[in-house]
Every structure is written in structure tokens, then in C-alpha cells.
């Protein structure tokens, strides 16, 4: 029997899958401080500042090609190009890379949009990052490539390249991650039960920077479908 909801439930967010179909998004996990040079550019020390986890709401996803309104309450919106992993299975307390790998449905190019001024204020106050990371339209993502369609080892030597208005701003090998994908999944699974529909943004390399209305952004990773989007005016403003 269907629940008797007192208001209409929101639709389930989804991301197109390359070749057809839609991936239903359950949760979005993100990892910060996962590239040594990015930790340094943010004023940290990779040896004493281990990677950290945070989340975004599922409906923060935005399809490739969209125009994203410049978010409210910030004057310093930053791009962070990232590899995104999509899960097809469940697990907790994963013990090895084989268990972790069995959960993966596919991967995609993504961008963790960040209200950097709000993040800086939160860090200074020892407060959560929610307002800096989990705002509307903060998780643009390209169509997901099924892992079975990605050539073996194609991502091992792949580079993550983020461009703004055609100028390359980030260019780093995925192999430069402090925690690789299986290690990220194993670490997350000790804090949460991972389930089908979860997305994991795996961290950004050095080169992050501000975006302004009118900017065009692309994120490319090896053979994966590229992510493109642009920044529009702030919502509600002419």
C-alpha cells in the first residue's frame, strides 16, 4: 500500500548514464584534502591533515550542459574538478579493494562547487561545511560511464583537466590521489553503510579558483564523457 503522504514527495534525483538510462542518486559523499598540492594551496599539511569526508544533498546534482545560477550568499564561488564514482551495491566495513571494486557501477567527471568564503568562515569557527558545500546546484556531473565500458586500466594513467573559458586551471594525474578509489570506499564504509545509488566525489587537485557569471567550465578525465557547464546570474537578480 502506497504511503499517504501529506505533501507530494520530491522526485528522485538522477544522472544520465552514457549509452542510456538514468542513475538514481541516493546520497552524495565527498572527500576533501585528497591531493597533496591542493592541501598545500589551502594552507594545510598533507602529513598532518588526512583526507576528510563531507556530504551534499542528492538534489545538488546538475546535468552536463546546464547554466548554473551564481549562488546566493557568496562572493567567492570556486570550481573543484573531480572524479566521481557511482555505486551499484551495498557494503560496510569493507576489508579489501576487491570488495570495494564490486560495488562500483561506473564513474564520471564532476565538479564540487564551493562557496569558499563561507568555507573559510566555517573553518575559522570550527563549524560544519554544510553551507559552503551543500547548496543548490553545487554538484554538476557528466553522464556516468559504466565501469564495464571503461577500458581496463584506462584511468590509471588518466589526468584530470579542468578548464575555465578554455584556459586550463587544473591538470593532474589521478594517480596523485593520497587515497585511491578502493581506499576511499573502504574508509567511507567504516563510517556509513554504502548503498546502491550513492555517488562519491573523490577530491580535487591543485589549481582551484573563482568563477563569475558568464564563465564556461569543462572537466575532462581520460575516456570519460566530459562535463561542461556555465555560470549564470545570481538567482532572482537581473
Image (spheres, grey):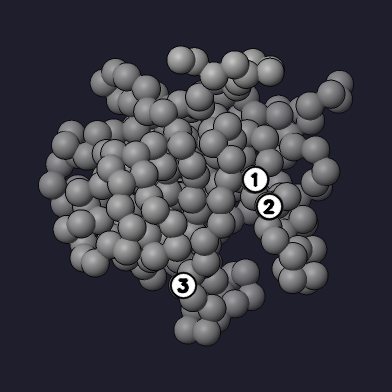
- How packed mark 3 is, by other alpha carbons closer than 10 Å (few <14, some 14-19, many 20 or more), is many
Q: Position of residue 226 (x, y in %)?
A: 39, 34
- Residue identified by numbered label 1: 134
Q: Residue at x 22, y 39 (%)?
A: 147
On the image, which quarter does residue 7 sit in?
Answer: top right
Q: State which tag comes first along the sequence, 1 or 3.
A: 3
Find numbered disc 1 in the image and state the secondary structure of the residue it sits on.
loop
Which residue is outermost to the front?
Answer: 1
**Marks 3/2: CA–CA distance:** 23 Å
Q: Position of residue 161 (x, y in %)?
A: 42, 48
**Marks 2/1: CA–CA distance:** 5 Å
Find numbered disc 3 in the image and state the secondary structure of the residue it sits on.
helix
Q: Residue at x 36, y 44 (%)?
A: 195
Foreground residue, 156 or 54? Answer: 54
Q: Are marks 2 and 1 in contact (CB under 8 Å)?
A: yes
- How packed mark 2 is, by other alpha carbons closer than 10 Å (few <14, some 14-19, many 20 or more), is some
Q: Are marks 3 and 2 in contact (CB under 8 Å)?
A: no
**Marks 1/3: CA–CA distance:** 24 Å
- Compared with 176, 102 (above or below) is above
- Residue identified by numbered label 2: 130
Q: Position of residue 165 (x, y in %)?
A: 58, 37
Callout in the foreground (3, 2): 2
Q: Residue at x 47, y 84 (%)?
A: 47
Q: Position of residue 225 (x, y in %)?
A: 34, 32
Is residue 142 visible from the viewing direction of this image?
A: yes
Please give the label number shown on residue 7: none
Amino acid at each position: 500500500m502506497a504511503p499517504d503522504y501529506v505533501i507530494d514527495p520530491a522526485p528522485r534525483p538522477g544522472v544520465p548514464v552514457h549509452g542510456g538510462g538514468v542513475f538514481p542518486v541516493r546520497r552524495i559523499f565527498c572527500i576533501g584534502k585528497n591531493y597533496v598540492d591542493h592541501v598545500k594551496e589551502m594552507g594545510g599539511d598533507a602529513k598532518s591533515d588526512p583526507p576528510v569526508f563531507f556530504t551534499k544533498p542528492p538534489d545538488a546534482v546538475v546535468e552536463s550542459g546546464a547554466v548554473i545560477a551564481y549562488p546566493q550568499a557568496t562572493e567567492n564561488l570556486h570550481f573543484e574538478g573531480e572524479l566521481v564514482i557511482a555505486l551499484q551495491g551495498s557494503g560496510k566495513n569493507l576489508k579489501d579493494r576487491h570488495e570495494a571494486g564490486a560495488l562500483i557501477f561506473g564513474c564520471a567527471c564532476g565538479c564540487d562547487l564551493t562557496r569558499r568564503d563561507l568555507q573559510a568562515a566555517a573553518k575559522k569557527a570550527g563549524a560544519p561545511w554544510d553551507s559552503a558545500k551543500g547548496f543548490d546546484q553545487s554538484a554538476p556531473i557528466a553522464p556516468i560511464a559504466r565501469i564495464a565500458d571503461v577500458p581496463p586500466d584506462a584511468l590509471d594513467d588518466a589526468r584530470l583537466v579542468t578548464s575555465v573559458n578554455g584556459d586550463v586551471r587544473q591538470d593532474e594525474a589521478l594517480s596523485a590521489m593520497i587515497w585511491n578509489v578502493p581506499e576511499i570506499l573502504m574508509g567511507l564504509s567504516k563510517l556509513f553503510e554504502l548503498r546502491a545509488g550513492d555517488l562519491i566525489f573523490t577530491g580535487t587537485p591543485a589549481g582551484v579558483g573563482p568563477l563569475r557569471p558568464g564563465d564556461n567550465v569543462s572537466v575532462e578525465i581520460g575516456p570519460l564523457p566530459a562535463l561542461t557547464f556555465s555560470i549564470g546570474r545570481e538567482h532572482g537578480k537581473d
